[in-house]
Image: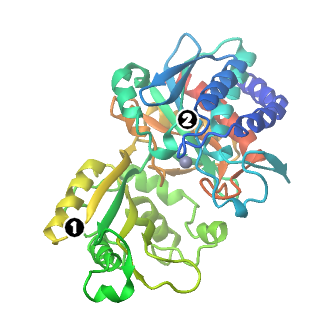
């Protein structure tokens, strides 16, 4: 990319940054909570209109039993780059902990607060503006962009698979970016080349039709103890997962990965600042904590419910107990294999009375830094920041990466607008406006680098 071209692209972004704030305010005000199915129609429409406003030709495509997926196209020659995002958001609870209305965005001291601002409406908008900046500076777009913005990611996209099977051609491209990555607390951008997978399960054990007087626990087994016993067979005190075969095919670190990971300054110890965590796992050094964070799995208890936990005492033996769990998985650990192994493991341990229900899954995926998309991202960051990005083989979270990589489309997280304290899924979700401004520039520079590299 020529110096002069880049200067004009970045200038457009600076001049239109006010539009980013206004458009994101309107977009985040559309309440699109997929967990409760709110705002599906409005979300699809608002997304389509937003893309159209920035010169992208967009259409809403029906997803069987789900909300519409918005496809936007810009550019008519050059390599194809898919830009995946979602317009749905997580529920806002606990509402008391928000300092302002989650769906009435406000800017306080350079920070934009709203549900969905970082995850991931801000990223979709930043990409729309980035391509407009290129079109304005050059008079054309040297690549073909395909925006794909769905409405159910936050509930693990239960209907996307059926859509994907019917429309695989849409997922075939020379590269794809999945949502947007974020920045460290200091503002260093982060490049993520994939995502961990997820298996979400619900375990239930029922020992009676109704709750009973607690004295009956002498005769009727207590389901909470039973569920605890089953859970304890899944994972040891150090976090090691005890399901046979769980680690057998898990991705092992490559030389390329270790080389870039070693240069990273990011320290998981940041979680103590950002989330007030009292301790961070993985070891005494940054390098040990970093490797643990990247190559570690989780068997996490999202929630555990049984009996009475209200004020005072109520003596009951609950009829049932329930736990929700999720496993974060590396490439080589397909969720369906883990589910099968977990069921077999519970059965072998005599836990036939534990009912296992699986919710959505996402497959793990990663792409080499040496790929076209990996290199374009790297050059995009180098153009927009005075700094090298921290690079990771995947994000800790899970997303739709695999829908692209399984069809041979290399995919990585795009440059993004968030930061380590963005509090995605949590109260007071936010983005720092300076991160967003540079994230839009990195996105535009990445698009130009992607168009050029062959
Ligand atoms: Zn999310």
- Disc 2 + disc 1, Cβ < 8 Å: no
**Scheme of image coloration:** rainbow
Q: In which quarter of the image is residue 179?
A: top right
Q: Nearer the viewer, residue 241 or 412?
A: 241
Seen at 61% across and 25% down, the residue is: 448
Q: Nearer the viewer, residue 322 or 155?
A: 322
Residue 450, relative to residue 273: is it above or below? above
Which residue in the protein does label 2 denote?
85
Q: Where is residue 23 in the image (x, y as percent from the top left)?
A: 76, 32
Q: What residue is shown at x 64% (from left), y 30% (from top)?
A: 42
Question: Quick check: 425 above or below 433?
Answer: below
Residue at 52%, 26% in the rendered image: 68
| Mark 2 residue CB less than 8 A from any atom of ligand 1 | no
Numbered mark located on residue 353 in the image: 1
Check disc 2 and report its element: helix, strand or loop: strand
Task: Please provide percent x and percent y for residue 375.
Answer: 51, 36
In the depicted view, which residue is nearer to us: 234 or 354?
A: 354
- What count of labels does the image hold? 2
Task: Sort mark 2 into few (<14), some (14-19) or many (20+) by Cα contacts within 10 Å.
Answer: many
In this picture, residue 392 sits left or right of residue 214? right
Alpha-carbon span between mark 2 and mark 1: 40 Å
Q: Which residue is drawn at 37% across and 49% down?
A: 359
Query: As rendered, which of 432 and 429 lies closer to the eye?
Result: 429
């Amino acid at each position: 990319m020529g110096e002069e071209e880049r200067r004009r692209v970045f200038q457009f972004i600076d001049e239109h940054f006010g539009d980013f704030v206004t458009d994101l305010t309107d977009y985040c005000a559309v309440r699109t909570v997929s967990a409760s199915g709110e705002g599906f129609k409005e979300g699809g429409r608002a997304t389509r209109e937003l893309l159209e406003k920035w010169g992208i030709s967009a259409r809403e495509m029906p997803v069987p039993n789900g909300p519409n997926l918005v496809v936007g196209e810009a550019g008519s020659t050059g390599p194809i780059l898919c830009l995946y995002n979602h317009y749905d958001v997580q529920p806002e609870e606990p509402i008391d902990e928000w300092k302002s209305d989650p769906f009435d965005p406000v800017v306080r001291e350079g920070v934009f607060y709203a549900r969905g601002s970082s995850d991931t409406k801000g990223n979709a908008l930043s990409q729309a503006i980035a391509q407009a900046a290129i079109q304005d500076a050059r008079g054309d777009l040297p690549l073909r962009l395909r925006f794909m913005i769905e409405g159910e990611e936050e509930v693990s996209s239960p209907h996307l698979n059926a859509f994907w099977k019917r429309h695989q051609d849409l997922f075939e491209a020379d590269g794809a970016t999945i949502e947007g990555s974020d920045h460290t607390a200091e503002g260093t951008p982060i490049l993520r080349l994939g995502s961990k997978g997820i298996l979400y399960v619900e375990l239930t054990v029922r020992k009676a039709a109704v709750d009973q007087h607690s004295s009956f626990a002498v005769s009727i087994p207590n389901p909470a103890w039973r569920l605890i016993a089953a859970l304890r067979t899944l994972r040891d005190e150090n976090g090691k997962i005890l399901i046979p075969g769980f680690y057998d095919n898990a991705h092992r670190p490559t030389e390329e990965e270790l080389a870039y990971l070693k240069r990273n300054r990011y320290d998981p110890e940041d979680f103590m600042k950002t989330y007030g965590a009292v301790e961070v796992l993985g070891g005494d050094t940054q390098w040990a904590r970093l490797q643990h964070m990247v190559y570690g799995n989780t068997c996490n208890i999202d929630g555990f419910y049984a009996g009475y936990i209200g004020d005072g005492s109520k003596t009951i033996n609950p009829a049932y107990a329930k736990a929700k769990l999720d496993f974060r998985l590396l490439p080589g650990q397909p969720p369906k294999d883990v589910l099968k192994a977990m069921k077999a493991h519970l059965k072998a341990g005599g836990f036939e009375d534990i009912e296992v229900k699986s919710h959505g899954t996402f497959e793990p995926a990663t792409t080499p830094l040496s790929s076209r998309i990996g290199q374009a991202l790297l050059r995009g960051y180098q153009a927009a920041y005075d700094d090298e990005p921290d690079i990771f083989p995947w994000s800790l979270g899970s997303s739709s990466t695999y829908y692209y990589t399984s069809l041979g489309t290399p995919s990585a997280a795009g440059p993004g607008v968030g930061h380590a304290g963005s509090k995605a899924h949590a109260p007071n979700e936010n983005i720092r406006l300076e991160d967003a401004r540079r994230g839009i520039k990195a996105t535009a520079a990445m698009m130009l680098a992607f168009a050029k590299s062959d």
